[in-house]
Image: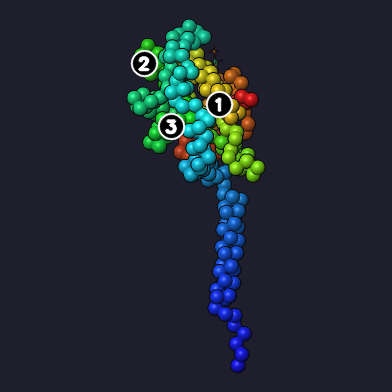
Amino acid sequence: MHSTLPPPEIAFNVALRQYIIAFCIYHTSFIYTIYIILPERVRRLAPRLYRVFSRHHRDHTSASALSAEEASAAVAEMQETASGHQVQFQMVDAITLPKVRNLNSVLFPVRYSGAFYKGLLHPGQFSQLAQYNNISVGTIACRSQPLGFADCSFTTMFDYNSPVPDKFELYMMTLGVLAPYRRLGIGRLFLQNAVEFAFRDQNIVRIVLHVQIDNDDALRFYHKHGFSTLRIVPHYYKNIEPSDAYLLEYRLR
Ligand SMILES: CC(C)(COP(=O)(O)OP(=O)(O)OC[C@H]1O[C@@H](n2cnc3c(N)ncnc32)[C@H](O)[C@@H]1OP(=O)(O)O)[C@@H](O)C(=O)NCCC(=O)NCCS
């Protein structure tokens, strides 16, 4: 009897093609499902993963963002607050890092990881320590990231016409001044320095940050300095209450 089976090499090719098509359909629908079903809180991991794996981001931070040394040169060592206090601002380096760690542990309910502190020393970050009468009294830490990371606006992040992100935002991770040294104008100078830093990079279009919804003092401070509230981010914080945050924005250009 005449066999209708195709020759083995053709059968193999057909099977391989079917396998590749099935593989693509499966993975495309899997990724699509993940994006649709994942709740806000889990989606917030995406920017972190992107930062770890993205060559684009590293390109930006090494090539177009300012290095810590450049930023250090951009701010005067001694600055005078509106109330006439002389405060020294310096870029965070390996020597000042333990002071920043101590301050953060007192200032914020959030515990920051070793990776966070290591990250402060990378190029493209803006982190400062303020000293008043040789006492470390406050700190700020910001990082440059593709525009839209803070609000997980994936359409902005992955503009199909532009494979390399060309617009960035400065994300303010921390800003704090020890209670006895508040209302002296130190927070305002930190903000001023961050704005100057961001302005010098043409690609950075805004400064963004999250604030716990019951942090009235900080909200008054930011609104007073031109920040506007974009929206509430439910369950932004993991282990603190209230867990909701406001997303605030300051447009630079
Ligand atoms: C928010 C914070 C950094 C402000 O720092 P600061 O050094 O006290 O701020 P400044 O002295 O520069 O304040 C500048 C202006 O902001 C406004 N402002 C600051 N704190 C305010 C408050 N508690 N209530 C109302 N307005 C306030 C005022 O208009 C003030 O000017 P004035 O003192 O002449 O009226 C500080 O309160 C802080 O460290 N809070 C705890 C940490 C925190 O919540 N950080 C923000 C979340 S990341």
* Residue 213 shows up from this direction: no
Residue drawn 63% across the image and 31% down it: 230
Q: Amino acid at mark 3?
A: His
Q: Amino acid at mark 2?
A: Ile
Q: Which residue is mark 2?
A: 135
- Marks 1 & 2, CB-CB < 8 Å contact: no
Residue drawn 60% across the image and 35% down it: 166
Q: CA distance from mark 3 to mark 1?
A: 16 Å
Q: CA distance from mark 2 to mark 3?
A: 25 Å
Q: Which residue is mark 3?
A: 122
Q: Amino acid at mark 1?
A: Asp
What secondary structure is found at the residue carrying circle 3? Answer: loop
Quadrant of the rendering where the N terminus is positioned: bottom right
Residue drawn 48% across the image and 44% down it: 53
What crowding class fits label 1: few (fewer than 14 Cα within 10 Å), some (14-19), or many (20 or more)?
A: some
Q: CA distance from mark 1 to mark 2?
A: 31 Å
- Marks 3 & 1, CB-CB < 8 Å contact: no
What secondary structure is found at the residue carrying circle 2? Answer: strand
